[in-house]
Image (cartoon, rainbow, N blue to C red):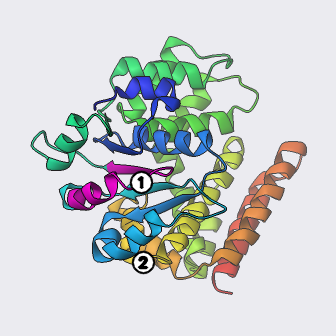
Amino acid sequence: MIYKSYLIEQNINLIDKNLFLFFGENIGLKNEFKNKIQLSSKDVPIIKYVQEEIIKNEESFFDEILNISLFEKEKFYFIEQSNDKILEIIKKIELKIQDSKIFLFADVLEKKSKLRNYFEKSKNIGAVPCYVDNEMSIKKIIMETLKGFKGLSSQNVNMIINNCNLDRLKLNNELNKIKTLFIDKNIESNKLEALMNPKLNDNFYLIKDEALKGNKIKTNEMLGNTIFDDEKNILYLSAINQRLNKLQETFELVKLTNLETAINTLKPPIFWKDKPSFIEQSKKWNSDKIKKVLNKTYDLEIKIKSSPTINKNILIKKMLVDICELANA
């Protein structure tokens, strides 16, 4: 049975089947569905798989699905990177699952895809196509997310639309940056334009990456040649936190597979140019180190917001030096 994605967006409770397939090129929309599913049932445990893990150990997967716990009668299962290879397994399990729900997430599936056809034609399971957004849907997301913000002129809305290039994943990242920068909910066009220009942020991201790799020489050299923008200090901290959270997510996946596969499983994916750096960082960090830095960035953010007269540049640079030191600890 085919479900319209915009209807599911409006009401996640329309997911009324035990088996659902989300497919298509709109990664941002699929990520939103994952978040909404989790938020709609906060007390339900969510178990994540990559399709290849299930295929390699089919029996273990069946045992997990069919094992009814006395304490957890309902579970949600997310299966990433799904394609036609998993169809026969789904057919075997379809009539046996009762309280639990299985959500499959796939990239583009052609019309001739056996998995897609099976989910679309069956009355007992659901398929949700996640196609690319258009300008109207992107504009609607901007207006809803930034509702209550002053300065949201047509010019600024168009600037955001042009910058994300109708990519919902990039749009959500940009909207998070905007909410972080304009905490007073007053958008200034010149600051927004600077925020939308990636070239202005390149130096910081390069330093951040070298610090996380524990490269003292490059970190110190770049810190000495860079002047940070006081208006973006919260964004700098947010960028550090995002990378640390992504590393933590990788460590959780590594428990089930190897590092390379774990990184390839991440959503949104790590850009191919950034992979070598990310792999190097993964080898330097662990959960305890990440927790220490996240606590420090949280404290520093409060300090920056509550003390407007302090030298923010020095504090951010010290934070990067501390991160570099901890990477090598």
Query: x, y (%) of residue 316?
Result: 73, 59
Q: Is residue 187 above or below residue 109?
A: above
> Closer to the observer: label 2 or label 1?
1
Query: x, y (%) of residue 206?
Result: 51, 63
Task: Name the residue rendered at 35%, 30% in the picture.
Answer: 166
**Quadrant placement of the N terminus:** top left
Query: x, y (%) of residue 190?
Result: 59, 27
Task: Name the residue rendered at 46%, 70% in the picture.
Answer: 278
**Quadrant placement of the C terminus:** bottom right
Find numbered disc 1 in the image and state the secondary structure of the residue it sits on.
loop
Residue at the top extreme of this rendering: 154
**Would residue 251 be counted in the magenta stretch?**
no
Residue 321 in sight: no
Q: Which residue is at the front of the view, 229 or 124?
A: 124
Where are the magenta residues, as a range? 86-105
Q: Is residue 139 above or below residue 297?
A: above
Q: Which residue is at the front of the view, 118 or 106?
A: 118
Q: Amino acid at mark 1?
A: Ile
**Would residue 103 be counted in the magenta stretch?**
yes
Q: Earlier in the sequence, mark 2 or mark 1?
A: 1
Evaluate if marks 2 and 1 touch, with contact meaning CB atoms under 8 Å apart: no
Residue at numbered disc 1: 97
User: On the picture, is 179 further left or further right than 20?
Assistant: right
Mark 2 and mark 1: Cα distance apart in space: 31 Å
Q: Is residue 240 above or below residue 134?
A: below
Query: x, y (%) of residue 309?
Result: 89, 45
Q: Amino acid at mark 2?
A: Leu
User: On the picture, is 116 further left or further right than 313?
Assistant: left
Residue at the bottom extreme of this rendering: 329
Q: Which mark is residue 259?
A: 2
